[in-house]
Amino acid sequence: MTNSQLVDELLDDRTYHIEFNGHLTNHAKHAVVALAGLGAPPTKIKAYYDNYARLTPYGYGLEAPRASKHAISASNWDSLLGKRTSFSAYCEFLDQQQELLGIDGLLKRYLLALLPGWVGAFTHATIHLGWALDANHRRMAIEGLAYMAFSYVSCHPERAVTAPAGGARGERAVDSLLRVAGAWDDDRDELHRWVEALVADTEAGAAQGIHPELSRSGLQYRIARLLAEGHPLIYETPAWIDDQDVSTSWEQLFHVVTLLYLAEPGDFVLLHLITSLHAMEQIARRLPADQGRYVVKCFWIGMLCILFSRADLPKRSTLARLHATYEDATDSAGQPLEGEGWGQIIARAIEEEEEHNPKLVYVLHRVWKRTGGRSIYRAAAACFTTTPELPESFEEPPTE
């Protein structure tokens, strides 16, 4: 079996549910796309898939598909968004719709309603869809759309307002990040207390309709509370989102999320900003050109919600220093001036049990190549993460 045949077979596999142990995401197919993109041999890809299904890094195996409680149709598909129900029925409905509309027609028909919820399932539904589009795989794309509906939690882009003078013409994405980080520096203790009080108020979370399963997560509950509550800094839309070419925005955003990751190398949460940005860019490429800015806007708002949910932001001085170091740095003739080269990084990634690391390397290697070998992406790719320990809340059984 060739590599492409194996990848297609694994991405088409329907043996397992999209989640396990409640709300933990099944990442197996994401790993297949990344490992194949890094040039891993078929035997390595198949072994990873089988081992992950048997025992994930969290210590649990994958689960069989769950029976759906509802039939999904054109009349009710959007009434169950975020209810965490009937994933298989969503897949069946979207499969039928794809037969009628084609994949681009399917995306055009359903994605605009789903994009505000791109952070749901800690961005993994969006990753599932975006990485499926990267791999050009029909079944995985249908699963990604279904998962976005299943896990939907809005970032409320309708709240966006034009940024004040600090976000006026001439500001780039990195300048916007530094402005927000500076605001945190000016009021760090108070903002920290505000976030911690917000996430501690579980009664308010329940009143806002946050699914009880997310309370087991800790992380996903924190993010859901910030998505629901918001903050003025989150909704101040920078002028560059509307003023500059969308392709320029993607390049600037990759610089921004990589700066954040280098500010706290190996941070598990910040890594997801990189892999989900790749997904959002792939999604935008399949939508009409005039909708690309909306995808960028949703990413910016959701990214800030994720950052705020940590009750902390990297200091402006740290981000500014990293930006000054890497803004113009490139790897001459593809060779690094310091640190590991791509051959070593990729070889390490292929041997990793923690699948977030080959995903990190896959994305950043692609961006490195298309930006003329910018050193920032190689430096960040070498900073592997570790599987986080699950909180004590996981000692309680799943709610679903």
Image (cartoon, rainbow, N blue to C red):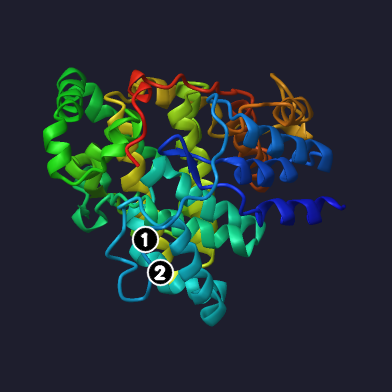
Res 90 quadrant in image: bottom left
What residue lies at 62% left-to-right and 26% top-to-bottom? 379
Direction right: furthest residue:
1
What residue lies at 18% left-to-right and 17% top-to-bottom? 189
Residues under labels 2 and 1: Cα distance? 7 Å
**Residue of label 2:** 110
Residue 117 drawn above or below residue 358? below
Do residues under tags 2 and 1 come within 8 Å of each other at their CB atoms?
Answer: yes
State the residue in front, 359 or 124. Answer: 124
Residue 108 drawn above or below residue 152? below
State the residue in front, 199 or 400. Answer: 400
* Residue 383, horizontal then vertical, whole percent: 59, 23
At label 2, the amino acid type is Tyr
Direction bottom: furthest residue:
100
Res 132 quadrant in image: bottom right
What residue lies at 41% left-to-right and 26% top-to-bottom? 320
* Residue 314, horizontal then vertical, whole percent: 36, 23
Tell me, yes or no, if residue 251 can be seen here.
Answer: no
- Secondary structure under the numbered disc 1 in the rendered image: helix
Q: Left or right: 187 with respect to 129?
A: left
**Residue of label 1:** 114
Tell me, yes or no, if residue 248 can be seen here.
Answer: yes
Rate crowding at label 2 as few (under 14), some (14 to 19) or many (20 or more) other CA atoms within 10 Å.
Answer: some
What residue lies at 75% left-to-right and 40% top-to-bottom? 45
Residue 271 shows which numbered tag?
Answer: none
At label 1, the amino acid type is Leu
Res 378 quadrant in image: top right
- Secondary structure under the numbered disc 2 in the rendered image: helix
Rate crowding at label 1 as few (under 14), some (14 to 19) or many (20 or more) other CA atoms within 10 Å.
Answer: many
- How many marks overall? 2
State the residue in front, 304 or 316. Answer: 304
Q: Quadrant of the C terminus?
A: top left
